[in-house]
Amino acid sequence: MAALASGGGRLFVVSGPSGAGKGTVVGQVLEQRPDIFLSISATTRPMRRGERNGINYRFLPEREFISGRDRGDFLESAEVYGHLYGTPRAPVENALKAGRDVICELDIQGALAVKRSRPDAILIFIEPSSLDELSSRLRGRGTEDPDTMRTRVKAAYEEIKSSGQYDHIVINDKLEDAVAEVLRILESSRKE
């Protein structure tokens, strides 16, 4: 698909390993740029403490997810850690058609799938300052058991090696610097 006409919305995909702080960075970007549409992913995984349906994710039964996937209702979908995740197509396309910029917060395989279907998408990789820092953040969340945490840290190492496939890499060493860099990327893309 060709890039959108001038004045149209741009599609940004933000990825990074679990615990890199991508959700926090995106949240702060949206506080400063409330005009940006945040795509809410769908998932079959159970809701975590503090999450709300339609805010953090659209939590769907597996049968409903698979039915939507088979109809082509997702821009991308994948199985991650035993659960299905996907980006609902209609909200993203409607926001872009309305001229709004869109941010999708996706894992690496989802981001690359979006890039294949929408070459105009701008991929931003949020990288932790170190794997030690990433491990510390995951422990601090308290949502993973030790085996799951080891799996995620190992996966993070592999994911960081994939960052070269992204248009931009942002190191999340200091949150305010990472947010400022993502905002700069959003602004500079409007001038392209």
Image: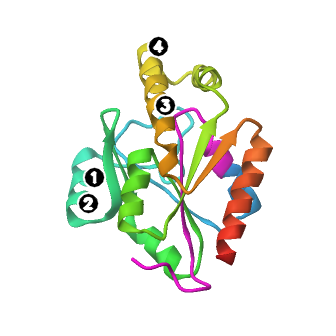
In the image, what residue occupies the spot 25% across and 45% down? 62
Instruction: Say if mark 1 contacts mark 4, CB within 8 Å.
Output: no
Q: Residue 32: x, y in percent? A: 76, 60
How far, Cα to Cα, is label 2 from label 3? 29 Å
**Type of amino acid at the residue the image marks with label 2:** Gly
- N-terminal of the pair, mark 3 or mark 1, is 1
User: Compared to 165, does 6 lie above or below?
Assistant: below
Q: What residue does disc 3 label?
A: 156
Q: Is residue 186 magenta?
A: no
- Judged by depth in the image, the label closer to the viewer, 3 or 4, is 3
How far, Cα to Cα, is label 3 from label 4? 15 Å
Residue 146 has which mark? 4
In the image, what residue occupies the spot 44% across and 46% down? 108
Instruction: Say if mark 3 contacts mark 1, CB within 8 Å.
Output: no
Q: Residue 15: x, y in percent? A: 52, 47
- Judged by depth in the image, the label closer to the viewer, 2 or 3, is 3
Residue 39 seen in render? yes
In the rendered view, how is the structure colored?
rainbow
**Type of amino acid at the residue the image marks with label 1:** Phe
Q: Which of the two residues, 50 or 2, is positioned nearer the viewer here?
A: 2
Instruction: Say if mark 1 contacts mark 2, CB within 8 Å.
Output: yes
How far, Cα to Cα, is label 3 from label 1? 26 Å
Q: What residue does disc 2 label?
A: 68
- N-terminal of the pair, mark 4 or mark 2, is 2
Instruction: Say if mark 4 contacts mark 2, CB within 8 Å.
Output: no
Q: What secondary structure is the magenta-colored segment mainly?
A: loop
- Judged by depth in the image, the label closer to the viewer, 4 or 2, is 4
Q: Residue 50: x, y in percent? A: 57, 36
Q: What residue does disc 1 label?
A: 65
Assign a secondary structure to mark 1.
Answer: helix
Q: Which residue range is magenta in the image?
A: 1-26
